[in-house]
Image (cartoon, grey):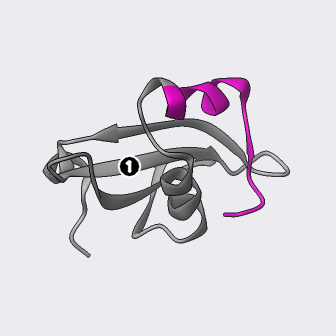
Amino acid sequence: MPDAVRTPHARVEPARRDLPEEIVRAVLEAPEQRAEARPGRVVLQSRVTMGSPGRRYLVRVVVDVQRRPPEVVTVYRTSRIAKYWRDE
């Protein structure tokens, strides 16, 4: 979803949460999974390895698709991959 714009909150969160901008951009452009959070809002997510030593995280980007252009609402990472990952 490369045409998505970011809310002020979504612009601040990656830096606050130690999430590299390149990773956020990669998830937006080519997520491993896309799930509907509720009507009009989707979650784009991908598994990534970050840090030293490398730890596995799930990066989740929440997008309001009812807006034109779509708006990134928030961005975060979690180590609880099994909680959110859906085997398809």
Q: Is residue 70 left or right of residue 52?
A: right
Work out whether 73 lies above or below 88: above
Toward the viewer: 16 or 82? 16
In which quarter of the view is residue 85 placed? bottom left
Work out whether 11 lies above or below 21: above
Q: Is residue 25 left or right of residue 8?
A: left
Toward the viewer: 11 or 5? 11
Work out whether 18 lies above or below 38: above
In which quarter of the view is residue 18 placed? top left
Q: Is residue 70 left or right of residue 43?
A: right
Q: Residues in magenta?
A: 1-15
The residue most toward the bottom is 88
Number of numbered callouts drawn: 1
The residue most toward the right is 68
Give amino acid for label 1.
Val
Residue 47, x across and y down, in percent: 30, 60
Quarter the C terminus occupies: bottom left
The residue beneath circle 1 is 59
Q: Secondary structure at mark 1?
A: strand
Residue 7, x across and y down, in percent: 72, 31
Q: Residue at x 66, y 63 (%)?
A: 1
Toward the viewer: 88 or 59? 59
Crowd band around label 1 with a 10 angstrom C-alpha radius: few (<14), some (14–19), many (20+): many
Toward the viewer: 8 or 73? 8
17 within the magenta span: no
Residue 80, x across and y down, in percent: 17, 42
Q: Residue at x 48, y 23 (%)?
A: 16
Q: Residue at x 14, y 49 (%)?
A: 53
